[in-house]
Image (cartoon, helix red, strand yellow):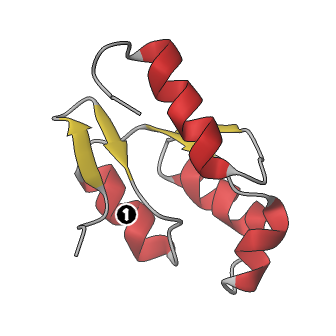
Amino acid sequence: MVKFPYWVIEGALAGSSMPLDEDTVAMWHRMRIRAVVILVEEWEFAMEGWDFNEYVNTLRRFGMDYLHVPTRDAMHRLRMFFIILLPGLIRI
């Protein structure tokens, strides 16, 4: 089982599934995570019982920056992100 978040580059780049509550965001903050790229669409938060705006406000309360890039195929977008920003580190 993969532990979330997991470090792709120790202390610099982590990956995670969608957080389910404020406690998860608090844990990220304790891990010194200060920025989040959100790939899921707003309605996907509602499916997990968490309003998207509430999530964004939680990030702000913890002083985290965020970029929302909603996509239907998050894995494809994530692979593009790694290819563009981290060439040679990830093989697809």
Q: Report which quarter residue 86 is drawn in.
A: top left
Is 25 on the left-hand or right-hand side of 61? left
Q: Residue drawn 43% across and 62% down?
A: 25
Give the residue at x 52% y 35%: 79
Question: Quadrant location of residue 24?
Answer: bottom left
Label 1 sits on what residue type? Answer: Ala
The C terminus lies in which quarter of the figure? top left
Q: In this rendered view, identify the residue nearer to me: 69 or 77.
A: 77
Secondary structure of residue under mark 1: helix
- Can you give x and y, in whole percent of width and height, for residue 74 in the image? 64, 50
The reply to whether residue 4 is visible in this rendering is: yes
Residue extending farthest to the front is 92
Residue ID for mark 1: 26
**Of residues 17 and 34, which is closer to you in this image?**
17
Q: Residues within 10 Å of mark 1 (few under 14, many from 20)?
A: some
Asked whether the viewer can see residue 51, the reply is: no
Q: Residue at x 74, y 83 (%)?
A: 47
Q: x%, y% of residue 70?
A: 77, 47
Residue at the image point whose x is 19% and y is 34% from the top: 11
Relative to 78, does residue 24 appear above or below in the rendering? below
Relative placement, left or right, of 70 versus 22 is right
For the N terminus, the image quarter is bottom left
Measured as percent of width and height from the top left, residue 78 is found at: 55, 39
Q: Say which of 72 and 4 sits in front.
A: 72
- As rendered, which of 22 and 61 lies closer to the eye? 22
How many labels sit on residues? 1
Tell me: 68 left or right of 34. Answer: right
Compared to 18, does 56 lie above or below? above
